[in-house]
Image (spheres, rainbow, N blue to C red):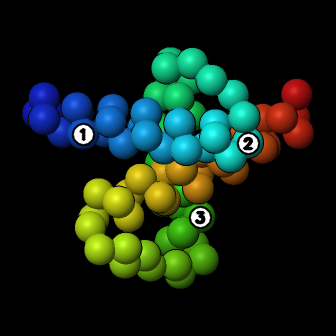
Amino acid sequence: MQAKSIIVWVLIGISAGWLASVIVGGGGLFRYLLTGLIGAFVGGFVFNAAGIKLNLGHPLVNEIVVAAGGAIIVVLVARILA
């Protein structure tokens, strides 16, 4: 994997984790990154399984929204289980 790809994944993860924390609470850069990256996988799976296709004008924005949705799911499930 190239350095540029890793940087983009990290930025998407941080952005998605921050959006999720604004909606459901939480904080910290590491937590943003972790929930955002896990949320990207969960969101991708959920959106594909539900047949939801986003077209928000830019592919990067689509990925951030999907990852944030997944991060919200991850945070809510973690709170239920804790």
Residue 42, visible in the rendered structure: no
Horizontal and vertical percent position of residue 37: 46, 37
- Badge 2 vs badge 1, beta-carbon distance below 8 Å: no
- Badge 2 vs badge 3, beta-carbon distance below 8 Å: no
Residue count near mark 1 (Cα–Cα under 10 Å), binned few <14, some 14–19, many ≥20: few
Mark 2: which secondary structure? helix
Return the residue at label 1: 8
Horizontal and vertical percent position of residue 22: 64, 40
- Report the residue at 23% width, 32% height from top: 6
Mark 1: which secondary structure? helix
- Report the residue at 27% width, 65% height from top: 59
On-image quarter of the C terminus: top right
Along the viewing direction, whichever of 46 and 73 lies nearer the viewer? 73
Return the residue at label 2: 24
Disc 2 from disc 1: Cα separation? 24 Å
Q: Give the amino acid at mark 3.
A: Val
Q: Give the amino acid at mark 1.
A: Val
- Badge 1 vs badge 3, beta-carbon distance below 8 Å: no
Mark 3: which secondary structure? helix
Residue count near mark 2 (Cα–Cα under 10 Å), binned few <14, some 14–19, many ≥20: few
Return the residue at label 3: 46
Along the viewing direction, whichever of 22 and 62 lies nearer the viewer? 22
- Counting residues from the start of the chain, the first of labels 1 and 3 encountered is 1
Q: In which quarter of the image is residue 49?
A: bottom right
Q: Quadrant of residue 10?
A: top left
Q: Which residue lies furthest to the front in this view?
A: 22
